[in-house]
Amino acid sequence: MGGDTPEWRAIYALQKRRSDFRNSPAGQQLLSDFERKHESIKQEYQRIIDLSCQLLTVEAKLLNELDHELARRLGVAPPEPINKVGFYGRRCPNRRLEIREDMNRRTANYRDPEDGRWRFRVFDTKAEAKDFEQQIAEEWVKIKKRKKAEKSKKRHKRLKRWVYERLQVSVRTSAGLRAN
């Protein structure tokens, strides 16, 4: 982009005036006035962030104590902590999320070996889905091996034909000699 036309010269001049203004005493004065006016807002914002972090820490400790007390009263092992940066408290179960995750675990996305289209099936258990995916993977391995063998066979035929052409021998003649 750019050029040596009057329009582009005007754009370049405007850009230069803008950059020069920021470095000029008037521009510096405007910037310092802006920063001074907004410094109190920045300080207030930082204070709110600090208070929020303190509140979250206190709530996390309280939730952790309540989780341990509940586990003690129920006679079960205390919950394991989740080692995630910024995570407070215990994971709250979301029923819809659990259902969707369970459905995803029981769903098998696969390419159908018959026509190569992508399909999905939902199974009753996760193990059935994994077994089905393993079965489909084995079928694809068989298909790939078969295609590789066919390709190798074709390559061998082409090579044989090329050799006979170079030797100037008919393929039919050499096949006939072998038969006798």
Image (tube, grey):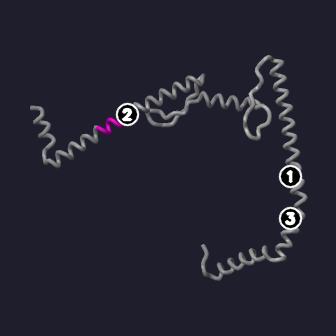
Q: Which residues are magenta?
A: 144-152
Query: Which kind of residue does numbered mark 1 sit on?
Result: Gln
Question: Residue 148: within the magenta?
Answer: yes
Looking at this view, name the residue that lies furthest to the left. Answer: 180
Per the rendering, the mark at residue 35 is: 3
Residue sitting at 32 percent across and 36 percent down?
Answer: 150
Instruction: State the CA–CA distance, disc 2 to disc 1.
Output: 64 Å
The label on residue 145 is: 2
* Whole-percent x, y for residue 14 in the image: 72, 77
Tell me the distance, in whole angstroms, between the alpha carbons under discs 1 and 3. 15 Å
26 left or right of 151 in image: right
User: Vertical placement of 32 versus 100: above or below?
Assistant: below
Depth order, front residue of 60/110? 60
What residue is pinned by disc 1? 46
Q: Earlier in the sequence, mark 3 or mark 2?
A: 3
115 within the magenta span: no
Q: Disc 2 marks which amino acid? A: Lys
Q: Quadrant of the N terminus?
A: bottom right
Residue 36 occupies quadrant? bottom right
- Callout 1 touching callout 3 (CB < 8 Å): no
| SS state under label 1 | helix
Residue placed at 88% from the left, 68% from the top? Answer: 33
